[in-house]
Amino acid sequence: MKTLGFIGTGGMGSGMAANLIKAGYRLVVNDIRREVARNLESQGAEFKASPKAVAEASELVLSMLPYNEAVKEVGLGKGGLHEASSGAKIWIDCSSIDKKTILGVHQELQKKGWKVMDASAGGVEEQAAAGTLSLWVSGPKELFDQHLPVFQAMGKKIVHVGELGNAKLVKNAMAMFGAIQHMGLAEIFTWLKKGGVSEETVHTVLRNSQNHSESVERVCETLVSRKFKPRKSWMPKDVGFGLEMAREMEVPVPFSALAYQLFSIAQANGLDGYEATGIAYHVYALISGQKKG
């Protein structure tokens, strides 16, 4: 079985990497925080001190990193992939970053003989651990086909979305759509509650309407139960990337821009310490004058 490298073993990355071990792959890992890799080491992964060392000890490198600069550093920084003298020459980056960054890193790495693919994950940490993520992958189709079993070990729904960088655009688009959906549902719940319709009734109405879907159901359940996960959402960051790209493309996206402003209101008022549903609930409680609870 192949030896894979995995760089970035935080909340999402650790679950994805663990599923690769479960699928029978030998794994070498790296993270700037050694402690977050300990659990993977206990499952048989081998820790390496740098991305360069990961590449030299593996046949294929994957990464799940938090922001643009981290991806640049892994690819092109000191001890980065570009310094590897042997081993892997294929990198699949699954980070939630912008398209410009992955294209720029690829432009430099291909001079060293690297082939780069990018992927984006739809889902949260629990889905990463369960291996039920949606994965959008872009880059050469032959590489996608060749490494499909790797993607299948980490995700349930895998789609090739075209040329390199498209997976980042799709991730931004899904975040924009999700932001609009979360804020829209919170708005409807808030309005109807003020009009005398209970949240449970709103939930039942939506469940029995043509607007019902798996994602709508998940948001409704959370709004009714108030079981908001106390961890910061990455959605505003991804929406921000989408807005920046839309401006460059001269494509108006007013709904996404408004949803982003609502996230900004939440941040300014210290209400952003939740995942997206919790942020949407609390920001609408604030602007409508309702008490939180």
Image (tube, rainbow, N blue to C red):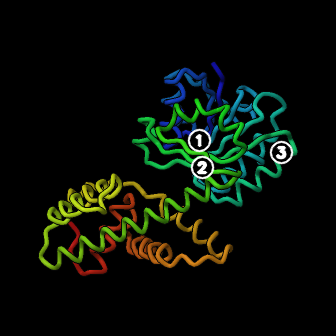
Give amino acid for label 2.
Ser
Assign a secondary structure to mark 1: loop
Q: Nearer the viewer, residue 37 or 4?
A: 4
The image shows residue 238 at horizontal and vertical percentages of 54, 61
Give amino acid for label 3.
Gln
The image shows residue 231 at horizontal and vertical percentages of 39, 54
Residue 110's disc is 3
Q: Which residue is mark 2?
A: 95
Q: Are marks 1 and 2 in contact (CB under 8 Å)?
A: yes
Give the mark, 3 or 1, whose residue is nearer the N terminus. Answer: 1
Give amino acid for label 1.
Gly
For the point 38% across and 58% down, the residue is 275
Disc 3 and disc 1: Cα gap in Å? Answer: 22 Å
How crowded is the residue under tag 3: few (<14 C-alpha within 10 Å), some, or many (20+)?
some
Disc 3 and disc 2: Cα gap in Å? Answer: 19 Å
For the point 55% across and 56% down, the residue is 171
Residue 172's disc is none
Give the mark, 3 or 2, whose residue is nearer the N terminus. Answer: 2
Vertical side of 78 occupied by 43: above or below: above
Give the mark, 1 or 2, whose residue is nearer the N terminus. Answer: 1
Vertical side of 80 occupied by 175: above or below: below
Q: Nearer the viewer, residue 266 or 159?
A: 159
Q: Which residue is mark 1?
A: 8
Foreground tag (1 vs 2): 2
| 125 displayed left or right of 121 | left
Vertical side of 222 occupied by 128: above or below: above
